[in-house]
Image (cartoon, coloured by chain):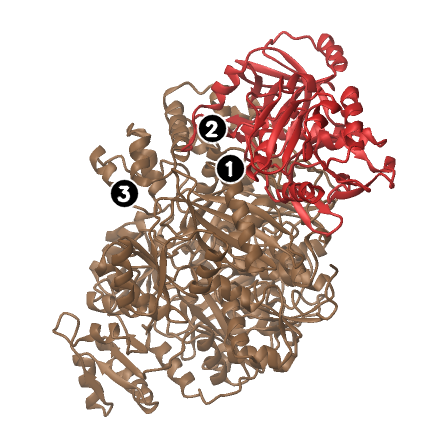
Chain colours: A brown, B red
């Protein structure tokens, strides 16, 4: 069937801010879909509240709205833009939920807008627990015994009937929010109450627990003619019980025979057919390891995180094909873009093995429980490809950038065998390392399998790696042994460590014996057809398919690895734009990256894609083959910056700001010298190495002080200390993470925090705009609400900022991007941090000023001058609108994480509010972040002593809005004394009714709780904040945020939001 | 122990010996299935060939004897990247290592199977030798490789005497040219009584048993080598008995009715080939294993018209015979290994037999 000619203008809904469970994969899918639609001449209107995404670029869609994802906004947008169709299945759960609500309201029908891709009936059949169950029963597909409940009592009754443990799954939530496994009635009540609250429709599924079964997924496609294919199947190494997003996953399945493989494949095709899906779909199964018995766990009637993974694992562009199907094409009419010869109606065949490992945020949330459950906790993931499983696992491990490079990276040697066996029961991110240790101690495979339920095949693969460790330790390093170690992807430095040699010696031996990496192509067809798309992975042993010869100049672009807190999708935005800019300049572009969720790892972004770990050795292997003319490191976050030194050693020219100047910005003494020379003040501070020195420095400066390691990422290990004990403790924490660099102790200044991104061509600078943080200095810039243009600092301060930026950029010989953070106290401007590279705010500021910073930076790196590119140097005129970037957190997903904000970054994503009026912009930003204060108009205030005076006017304004205020003793007293009515409530340890009863009673909309500074954070406060978050209550921990919120609430009379098309800026 | 794979073009791969240490010369083909290695090994259509598996990890779930497609493995040799050290599956009865040894199948592991596949793709299927003798002399080996032909292999793989699978439904005569067990199984499961006949049974003998339908099976080798069988098939064509044919059976029927077959460059072997039903436009993913194909240019439209074609290379995947209750397919609706999407063709065959009755 050719494409439906009635479809001319399509509204695509994106997935909003990055949160755990809904991350960069939807930017990838959405971007690919937009490009696929535009290829067909369709006008694309895009709605997404997330400014860091590539899909919200004016190059990707025709009209771009970075507005809150609410029903009201979509309705208004449809009235304004009059699209004829909405494509909801490529924007994750958020987009799907919105489309469903519009459909249910009858709005789409009323305005003659159709849902394309998949009908609302289909979505309902897949998403509604009861309808899904009925549908599966109708076609005889087994599901675990289950019941949809709307109250706790029914849940208890059903669980008693089917027996504990039971799994709880709230309907219409993402990443399994609010779900979990209950082993007894007490746990059931706790999880169920919460789940009922989080579900959009107040429904939770109570289900027979099939924990321990194999978890298998199929990615399926279907077109409107009924043709079905499976793109890929995947097997979770972690059996059922761990969310698939938190599981180590291998593709294709490894322990299934053809009978099992085909049984589940046929089932998946039956399901997609019965549901009538047109597009992509993901089916999850639990398979009894001891029989052919299986259960359908879940169906996602849309592209998902798994489909992004399947696309990268196979080379099959699921989102692109899904978009074409939505337009009416059938699978046999859509060309396979990888081979250029075959069609989309085939099934990819792999001749390699893919391993995905989740990137978990426990390095950021030290207090959080590391246990993995059905509630997803990972912020991102890495993928690796190799022609053997062991090698793929080793590569994935070192791609994580979590100080792990082998199965020896976590030390369990101190445990007794008994303790170790006991600890095998722990299901967390260190499980495979524990299994490796168990293998080292000769604990039988069977025992490990009995406890973990992980298949013996995977345990044996871990054993093969452990045996190689032993061989390298004990045997002479012969050519044969080294060859085998490299086949298993042991890095040179690990081999060296084990064999008692330097990494360089290992490298020499390899060169001598000709043991080098060769590259194979991901071609969707196991070499059956010639492929034209250079998408490569490395193996040891075998023919090299990567062709290094070309006439063009070559540039190597280093990606930013897995999405983690502090290094998110923004850097992928930068990498992709840099790639496109180089391409325009006539370069051959080469990307190395290992994140399957991103646009940069799509096969048609760069001329060549190497899907590889970002370590010096892996990069060097690519360099050896490609011999690039230069490399760009300033767009890939710290991941790329960290590789600078290694690249220089390899003889690769660093394009843009030189390495010495990057160092100068980080090296305290060099940097102080530059500041002095430029007459730029900075908060007083010292560089120290030990705890004693730190305490001495702190006392000399006077508390409070800021303590942090140099070379920071997202404020890792950065803290405000108010006394000697604090300093001692922080130094301890910092040193836990291997530190080769010194520690900085600075005087902490409480002023306005200001941030600029600038491009410098060596002579002139260009500052698109000045951004101001709403929260006072002390809260990480990534967690602060950022306002462009800055509104509370004077014009002369702005001129000073421009002047300092110019001086710093020139003194550091910046060629390309620079990011500077300032503190402004009145007319005084201090510099607090300089990063001569791209930053988190680049996509945001590019979009709201309309200045394409990354392409500009790329052009100046190549020698163009800003003036010749048509720009007037200096600070650009301010825009007429306000654009506010609001951080978004995923605290409810991470049990035990402290939600209070400080110098350590905690947010996972961001959204934008844009408007000519500041208040409307602020309102939109809060709305986009999901802060939707509604129902009860009850709030709790409990603030530390320093904040007691400042809270009074804020509380008064909330009271004026009709809020009933509950407060703890001293806060209540201060408020009442100052004419704000506050109901005094008992603290947690005091008898009921106390604060906890209020929170758990689901009657509270908002908690304002400012934690006391330093490490002596009240335990009470922590518990209050955690419980509030886990019951879905908004929690604010900074007064500035609270004030901004009340300001925005005072403007909720804004009925009709004015929508801004970013593409017109 | 080291093993060597020597190709007709002089390429030598060095790997590790698996299975038998015996030296063997055969036609080298590749299969892209990611599961179902035992089904591939026991598919009689591989007689006279050595199979290279493109999926690099083989033997992961061991040997489950009930998955065999015939009573023994047929390939002359087996070529893999890696054999799993331990198998893991609840049905596993043995390791693939033991299986290859028991049946004396020589093989080679640890070679770059992707490189081999690329050679076969570019240069076409060619002959090769697997040997454990490190002192082979290329100039002696190559002439032997050039001289090798698969020859008449159907006689090696067909059953010796007729057997019956009881059923209450239509009576099907299954001509065994090297039939995969799941063909009889697929019919029997649907209620058919299936009588399996050796390949060289005369048409008269079959027709004398008054079957409701005749099933022509898959099998190995060049269809044109089967001259006697083609003659008998012509007689079956002339009878009014409904006929369904798969793979070699499909090619033989085409030859019997005046069309021609040709050798493909490297064939179709795997479980991901899209075939289009030309009547409905629907596309099915199919299991395939063939190196020859019916040349549609030679079809007499008054006799047979294409019913299925391959979406990728547009080669013929099935024929419908004009004015006859006969349809034939190049792919494998019985699957095993591979997708079961076209299993409905057995239902179509049964319906055809019922209507004819």
User: How crowded is the residue under tag 1: few (<14 C-alpha within 10 Å), some, or many (20+)?
Assistant: some
Q: Which residue is mark 2?
A: B64
Front-most of residues B196 and A470 = B196
In the rendering, at what x and y percent does residue A69 appear? 51, 73
Q: Is residue A83 above or below residue B93?
A: below
Callout 2: residue from which chain? B
Q: Is residue A44 above or below residue A981?
A: above
User: Tags 1 and 3 in contact by the CB under 8 Å rule?
Assistant: no
Q: Residue at point 75% right, 50% down? A: B279
In the rendering, at what x and y percent does residue A1056 appear? 53, 87
Tell which tag, 3 or 2, sits nearer the viewer: 2
- Helix, strand or loop at disc 1? helix
Q: Is residue A74 above or below residue B110?
A: below
- Give how far apart the Cα atoms at labels 2 and 1 are: 10 Å
- Give how far apart the Cα atoms at labels 3 and 2 are: 31 Å
Which tag, 1 or 3, sits closer to the chain's start?
1
In the rendering, at what x and y percent does residue A256 appear? 48, 37
- Helix, strand or loop at disc 3? loop
Q: Which residue is mark 1?
A: A259
- Determine whether, in the image, residue B192 is placed left or right of residue A920: right
Callout 1: residue from which chain? A
- Helix, strand or loop at disc 2? loop
Front-most of residues A157 and A669 = A157
User: How crowded is the residue under tag 2: few (<14 C-alpha within 10 Å), some, or many (20+)?
Assistant: some
Front-most of residues A1061 and B189 = B189
User: Tags 2 and 1 in contact by the CB under 8 Å rule?
Assistant: yes
Front-most of residues A674 and A604 = A604
- Determine whether, in the image, residue A611 is placed left or right of residue A321: left
- Determine whether, in the image, residue A357 is placed left or right of residue A521: left
Q: Which residue is mark 3?
A: A425
């Amino acid at each position: 069937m050719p494409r439906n000619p009635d479809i001319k203008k399509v509204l695509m809904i994106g997935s909003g801010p990055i949160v755990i469970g809904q991350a960069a994969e939807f930017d990838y899918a959405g971007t690919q879909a937009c490009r696929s639609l535009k290829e067909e001449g369709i006008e694309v209107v895009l709605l997404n509240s997330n400014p860091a995404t590539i899909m919200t670029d004016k190059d990707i869609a025709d009209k771009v709205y970075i507005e809150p994802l609410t029903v009201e906004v979509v309705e208004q947008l449809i009235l304004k833009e009059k699209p004829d169709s909405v494509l909801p299945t490529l924007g994750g759960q958020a987009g799907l939920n919105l489309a469903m609500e519009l459909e249910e309201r009858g709005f789409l029908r009323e305005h003659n807008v159709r849902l394309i891709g998949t009908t609302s009936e289909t979505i309902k059949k897949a998403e509604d627990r009861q309808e899904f169950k009925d549908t599966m029963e109708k076609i005889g597909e087994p599901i675990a015994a289950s019941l949809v409940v709307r109250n706790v009592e029914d849940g208890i009754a059903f669980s008693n009937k089917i027996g504990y443990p039971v799994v709880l799954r709230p309907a219409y939530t993402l990443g399994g929010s609010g779900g979990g496994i209950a082993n007894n009635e007490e746990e059931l009540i706790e999880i169920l109450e919460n789940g009922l609250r989080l579900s959009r429709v107040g429904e939770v599924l109570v289900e027979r627990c099939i924990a321990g079964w194999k978890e298998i997924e199929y990615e399926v496609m279907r077109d409107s003619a009924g043709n079905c294919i499976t793109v890929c199947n995947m097997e979770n190494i972690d059996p059922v019980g761990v969310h698939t997003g938190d599981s180590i996953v291998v593709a294709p399945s490894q322990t299934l025979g053809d009978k099992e493989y085909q049984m589940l494949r046929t089932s998946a095709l039956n399901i997609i057919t019965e549901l009538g899906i047109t597009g992509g779909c993901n089916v999850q199964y639990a398979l009894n390891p001891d029989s052919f018995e299986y259960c359908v766990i879940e169906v996602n009637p849309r592209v998902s995180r798994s489909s992004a993974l399947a696309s990268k694992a196979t080379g099959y562009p699921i989102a692109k094909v899904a978009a074409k199907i939505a337009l009416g094409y059938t699978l046999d009419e859509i060309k396979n873009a990888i081979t250029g010869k075959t069609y989309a109606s085939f099934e990819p065949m792999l001749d390699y093995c893919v391993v995905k490992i989740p990137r978990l945020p426990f390095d950021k949330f030290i207090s959080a429980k590391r246990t993995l459950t059905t509630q997803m906790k990972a912020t991102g993931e890495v993928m690796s490809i190799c022609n053997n499983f062991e090698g793929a696992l080793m590569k994935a491990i070192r791609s994580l950038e979590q100080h792990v490079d082998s199965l020896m990276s976590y030390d369990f040697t101190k445990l007794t065998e008994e303790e170790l066996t006991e600890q095998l029961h722990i299901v967390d991110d260190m499980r495979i390392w524990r299994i490796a240790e168990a293998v080292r101690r000769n604990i039988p495979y069977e025992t490990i399998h009995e406890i973990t339920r992980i298949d013996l095949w995977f345990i044996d693969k871990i054993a093969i790696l452990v045996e190689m460790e032993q061989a390298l330790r004990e045997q002479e390093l012969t050519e044969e042994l080294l060859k085998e170690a490299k086949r298993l992807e042991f890095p040179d430095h690990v081999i060296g460590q084990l064999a008692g040699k330097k990494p360089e010696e290992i490298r020499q031996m390899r060169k001598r014996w000709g043991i080098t990496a060769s590259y194979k192509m991901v071609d969707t067809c196991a070499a059956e057809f010639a492929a034209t798309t250079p998408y490569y992975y490395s193996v040891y042993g075998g023919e090299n398919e990567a062709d290094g010869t070309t006439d063009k100049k070559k540039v190597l672009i280093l990606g930013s690895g897995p999405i983690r807190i502090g290094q998110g999708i923004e850097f992928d935005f930068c990498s992709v734009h840099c790639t496109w800019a180089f391409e325009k300049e006539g370069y051959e572009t080469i990307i190395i990256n290992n994140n399957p969720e991103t646009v940069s790892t799509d096969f048609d972004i760069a001329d060549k894609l190497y899907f590889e770990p970002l370590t010096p050795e892996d990069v060097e292997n690519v360099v050896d083959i490609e011999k690039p003319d230069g490399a760009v490191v300033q767009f890939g976050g710290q991941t790329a910056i960290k590789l600078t030194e290694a690249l220089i050693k390899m003889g690769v020219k660093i394009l843009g700001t030189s390495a010495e100047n990057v160092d100068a910005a980080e090296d305290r003494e060099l940097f102080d010298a530059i500041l002095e020379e430029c007459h730029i003040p900075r908060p007083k501070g010292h560089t120290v190495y030990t705890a004693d020195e730190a305490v001495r420095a702190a006392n000399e400066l006077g508390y409070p002080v800021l303590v942090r390691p140099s070379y920071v990422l997202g404020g890792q290990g950065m803290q405000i200390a108010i006394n000697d004990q604090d300093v001692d403790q922080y130094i301890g924490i910092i040193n836990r993470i291997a530190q080769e660099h010194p520690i900085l102790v600075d005087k902490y200044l409480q002023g306005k925090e200001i941030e600029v991104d600038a491009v410098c061509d060596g002579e002139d600078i260009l500052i698109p705009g000045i951004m101001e943080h709403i929260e006072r200095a002390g809260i990480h810039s990534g967690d602060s609400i950022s306002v462009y243009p800055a509104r509370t600092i004077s014009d002369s301060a702005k001129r000073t900022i421009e002047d300092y930026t110019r001086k710093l950029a020139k003194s550091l010989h910046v060629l390309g991007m620079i990011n500077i953070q300032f503190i402004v106290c009145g007319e005084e401007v201090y510099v607090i941090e300089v990063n001569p590279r791209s930053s988190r705010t680049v996509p945001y500021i590019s979009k709201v000023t309309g200045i394409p910073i990354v392409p500009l930076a790329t052009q100046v790196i190549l020698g163009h001058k800003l003036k010749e590119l048509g720009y007037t140097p200096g600070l650009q005129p301010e825009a007429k609108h306000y654009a506010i970037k609001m951080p978004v957190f995923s605290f409810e997903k991470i049990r035990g994480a402290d939600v209070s904000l400080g110098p350590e970054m905690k947010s996972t994503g961001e959204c934008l509010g844009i408007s000519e009026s500041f208040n409307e912009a602020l309102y939109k930003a809060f709305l986009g972040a999901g802060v939707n204060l509604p129902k009860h108009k009850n709030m709790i205030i409990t603030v530390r002593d320093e904040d007691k005076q400042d809270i009074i006017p804020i509380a008064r304004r909330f009271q004026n809005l009709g809020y009933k205020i509950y407060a703890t003793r001293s806060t209540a007293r201060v408020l009442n004394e100052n004419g704000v009515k506050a109901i005094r409530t008992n603290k947690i340890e005091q008898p009921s009714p106390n604060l906890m009863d209020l929170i758990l009673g689901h009657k509270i909309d908002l908690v304002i709780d400012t934690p006391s500074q330093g490490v002596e954070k009240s335990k009470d406060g922590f518990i209050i904040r955690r419980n509030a978050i886990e019951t879905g209550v908004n929690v604010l921990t900074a007064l500035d945020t609270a004030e901004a919120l009340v300001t925005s609430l005072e403007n909720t009379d804004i009925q009709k939001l004015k929508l801004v098309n970013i593409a017109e800026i | 122990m080291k093993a060597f794979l020597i190709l007709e073009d002089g390429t030598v791969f060095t790997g590790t010996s698996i299975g038998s240490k015996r030296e063997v010369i055969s036609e080298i083909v590749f299969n892209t299935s990611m599961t179902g290695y035992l089904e591939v090994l026991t598919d009689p259509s591989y007689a006279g060939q050595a199979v290279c598996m493109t999926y690099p990890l083989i033997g992961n779930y061991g040997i489950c004897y009930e998955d065999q497609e015939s009573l023994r493995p047929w390939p002359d040799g087996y070529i893999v990247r890696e054999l799993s050290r331990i198998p893991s599956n609840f049905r596993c009865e043995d390791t693939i290592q033991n299986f290859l040894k028991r049946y004396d199948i020589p093989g080679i592991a640890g070679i770059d199977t992707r490189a081999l596949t690329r050679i076969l793709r570019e240069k076409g299927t060619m002959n090769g030798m697997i040997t454990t003798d490190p002192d082979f002399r290329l100039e002696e080996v190559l002439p032997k490789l050039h001289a090798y032909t698969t020859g008449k292999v159907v006689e090696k793989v067909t059953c010796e005497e007729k057997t019956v699978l009881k059923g209450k439904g239509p009576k099907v005569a299954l001509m065994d040219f090297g039939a995969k067990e799941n063909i009889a199984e697929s019919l029997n499961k649907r209620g058919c009584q299936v009588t399996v006949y050796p390949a060289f049974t005369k048409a008269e003998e079959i027709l004398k048993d008054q079957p409701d339908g005749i099933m022509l099976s898959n099998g190995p080798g060049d269809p044109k080598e089967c001259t006697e069988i083609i003659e008998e098939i012509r007689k079956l064509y002339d009878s009014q008995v409904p006929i369904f044919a798969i793979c070699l059976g499909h090619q033989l029927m085409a030859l019997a009715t005046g069309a021609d077959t040709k050798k493909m460059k490297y064939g179709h072997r795997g479980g991901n080939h899209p075939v289009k039903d030309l009547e409905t436009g629907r596309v099915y993913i199919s299991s395939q294993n063939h190196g020859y194909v019916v040349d549609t240019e030679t079809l007499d439209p008054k006799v047979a018209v294409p019913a299925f074609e391959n979406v990728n290379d547009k080669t013929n995947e099935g024929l419908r015979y004009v004015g006859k209750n006969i349809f034939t397919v190049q792919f494998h609706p019985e699957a095993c290994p591979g997708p079961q999407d076209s299993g409905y063709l057995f239902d179509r065959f049964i319906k055809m037999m019922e209507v004819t009755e």
